[in-house]
Amino acid sequence: MGRESASSEKMKLLLSLLALQFCFAGFHIVSRFALNMGVSKVVYPVYRNIIALVLLGPFAYFLEKKERPPLTFSLLVQFFLLALVGITANQGFYFLGLYYASPTFASAMQNSVPAITFAMASVIRLEQVNIARRDGLAKVVGTILSVAGATVITLYKGPPLLHLSEHPLGNSIEENTFVASKTVQNWTLGCLYLLGHCLSWSGWMVLQAPVLRKYPAKLSLTSFTCFFGLIQFLVIASLVETDTDRWIIHSKEELLTILYAGVVSSGIVIALQTWCIHKGGPVFVAVFQPVQTVLVAIMASLILRDQLYSGGIIGAILIMIGLYSVLWGKNEEKKVIAQEKEESLTKHLLHDVEEALNKEGKIETGLP
């Protein structure tokens, strides 16, 4: 009976993880669809963050009443900076990258986030690296492979794999050459924006760690970050999109893309991801990240007719190998630390027992 229950729980976790990756993959497709319809790259995240704040705010207020520390000016400044990196720069670079590149390679580039986060945390001494041990070496090698993969995606597009028609037929050789050159330039620019997105995301996770120690209410912290991110996006959007028509939702399709971004990607995803991490742990959840890239590639080619390029595939494979190398290293490091703690505790207990026996022996013999 217990075995059946454990098997059922594992199946629930696996199905939830697949659902989570489908939600993430859907966001890439829906966002690209919105950009193709002409939705503004800065107005779209404004509406997304409004919905996210409306969804998260009440839960944060009622569920974390007791564990929420008092607000200080210093904390508000830190929330503002977290929002600047984790919301404004992160989402801004993402939408710019998605506009110039493709959903498939946006998802592929995101697989490099754990390695970039590890590199950043190592630089500021939040993460310890011991290359003499195999776990430390695995994390370093994984980081190098992830960076190499992102570099390949950015600098080498390569020949197309699906041979989909991308340009109108009947153009002259000069026109086709110009279009191809412009496409490569846009691709490189898009990949650079996506790299900025990954750097911002990693920076947000690294900066968030010390803030969470001072302010452990996670939902409230997310809500404050979302609020300041919304304010920042509103300022940027008001300067960039002066035409009021760009702020109006013109069709049912536009409304559905915005609702998906806010409700599914910022509401359901957070709840589902939290549950999956609680049940399976962060490493187990992160292992499923590449599934998202495969789903996005399939959906993008079927729905959006997006082209796949050999350079992107090579880069994505390098990033995935790097991701698993870093995750394996982190997992092994936890085992080593747990073993060292156990050995230290055993040694300490044996020392106490030895001292007690020596003391007892001295009392019995009458020695001082």
Image: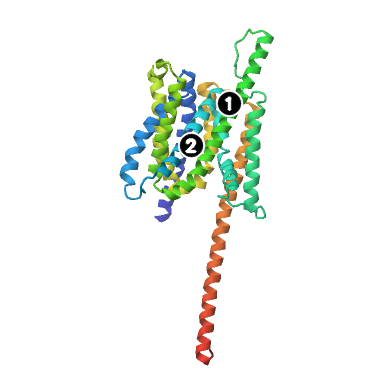
Reading the image, the residue beneath label 1 is 190
Q: Which mark is residue 86?
A: 2
Quarter holding the N terminus? bottom left
> Does residue 234 appear anywhere in the picture?
yes
Which residue, as the protein is rendered here, is positioned at the far front?
73
Residue 171 sits above or below residue 360 on the image: above
Residue 192 sits above or below residue 62 on the image: above
Q: Is residue 203 left or right of residue 238?
A: right
Q: Residue at x 49, y 31 (%)?
A: 91
Q: Amino acid at mark 1?
A: Gly
Q: Nearer the viewer, residue 156 or 45?
A: 45
Q: Amino acid at mark 2?
A: Gly
Which residue, as the protein is rendered here, is positioned at the far bottom?
366
Q: Is residue 78 left or right of residue 169?
A: left
Query: In the structure shown, which secondary structural element does the residue marked by tag 2 occupy?
Result: helix
Q: Nearer the viewer, mark 1 or mark 2?
A: 2
Q: Nearer the viewer, residue 233 or 277?
A: 233
